[in-house]
Image (cartoon, rainbow, N blue to C red):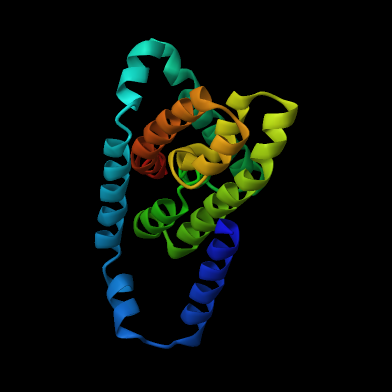
């Protein structure tokens, strides 16, 4: 259901953009992209603050808890690097796009501001596709591999939109690690995007 809503929202947005129509409430959002970005960051802060049990689990796992988010981040950036070589795109753009880690709204808006509208659109679509494919691949990974592998495709979304499906197909321990991974990845997204876009 979530995937269908995302696709519908994207299609409606495309039609609105191509139509040339001007609805004042939507124009306010378009003209104040920075504010939208800050609201997104604020909502992530709320999400992190609501996960009260996560801090006690961090003490329990110690440094080992960072293995999954570090692996997810390195794997994503490596994927962006490889794709930039295949597509003959500047490496800074490829790695910045991959640094969205599935957080399509933030990646799209940020890269539209820091680079071009085209790069922002690519970032939006690639990170949206990552989230959509996560819904489809997580059940397969849970059955054929192990529960920890279910966290990787979700990236930054493992603390929110893809968490219900991770909860359905894994266990409580994996859910805790999933939330922590999402928190770390979400925190790193704006830092990584800014870093890689500035090495252009």
The N terminus lies in quadrant: bottom right
At horizontal 53% and vertical 45% (from top left) the residue drawn is: 94
Q: Nearer the viewer, residue 186 or 160?
A: 160
Please say if 75 is above or below 29.
Answer: above
Residue lying farthest to the right in this orientation: 144
Residue name at image x 36 percent, y 54 percent: 110
- The count of marks equals 0
Task: Please identify the quarter of the rendering in which residue 156 is found.
Answer: top left
In the image, 138: left or right of 194? Answer: right
Q: Position of residue 73 (x, y in %)?
A: 49, 31
Residue 176 position within the rendered picture, expressed as x and y whole percent measured from the top left:
44, 27
- The percent position of residue 129, horizontal first and vertical second, equals 59, 52
Indicate the quadrant where residue 193 lies.
top left
Q: Quick check: 21 left or right of 126?
A: left
The residue depicted at 59 percent of the width and 30 percent of the height is 170
Relative height, residue 41 to residue 36 (above, below): above
Could you say which is closer to the camera, residue 63 or residue 138?
Answer: 138
Please tell me which residue is depicted at 33% across the width and 72% down the height of the picture.
Answer: 30
At which x and y percent is residue 22?
37, 87
Residue 183: quarter of image: top left
> Which is more toward the observer, 121 or 23?
23
The answer to whether one can see residue 20 in this image is yes
With respect to residue 82, does 68 lie above or below? above
In front of the other: 53 or 8: 53
- Location of the C terminus by quadrant is top left
Q: From the viewer's perspective, tell me whether residue 40 is left or right of residue 4.
A: left
Asked whether residue 71 appears in the rendered view, the answer is no
């Amino acid at each position: 259901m979530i995937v269908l809503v995302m696709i519908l929202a994207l299609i409606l947005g495309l039609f609105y953009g191509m139509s040339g129509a001007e609805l004042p409430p939507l124009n306010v959002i378009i003209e104040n992209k920075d504010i939208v970005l800050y609201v997104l960051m604020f909502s992530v802060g709320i999400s992190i603050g609501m996960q009260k049990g996560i801090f006690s689990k961090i003490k329990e796992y110690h440094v080992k808890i960072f293995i999954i988010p570090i692996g997810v981040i390195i794997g994503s950036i490596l994927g962006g690097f490889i794709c930039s070589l295949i597509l003959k795109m500047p490496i800074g753009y490829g790695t910045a796009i991959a640094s969205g880690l599935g957080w399509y709204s933030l990646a799209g808006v940020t890269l539209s501001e820091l680079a071009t509208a085209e790069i922002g659109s690519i970032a939006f679509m690639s990170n949206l596709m990552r989230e959509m494919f996560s819904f489809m691949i997580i059940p397969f990974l849970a059955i054929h591999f192990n529960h920890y592998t279910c966290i990787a495709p979700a990236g930054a979304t493992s603390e929110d939109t893809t968490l219900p499906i991770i909860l359905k197909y894994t266990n409580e321990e994996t859910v805790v690690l999933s939330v922590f991974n999402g928190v770390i990845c979400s925190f790193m997204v704006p830092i990584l995007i800014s870093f890689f876009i500035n090495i252009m």
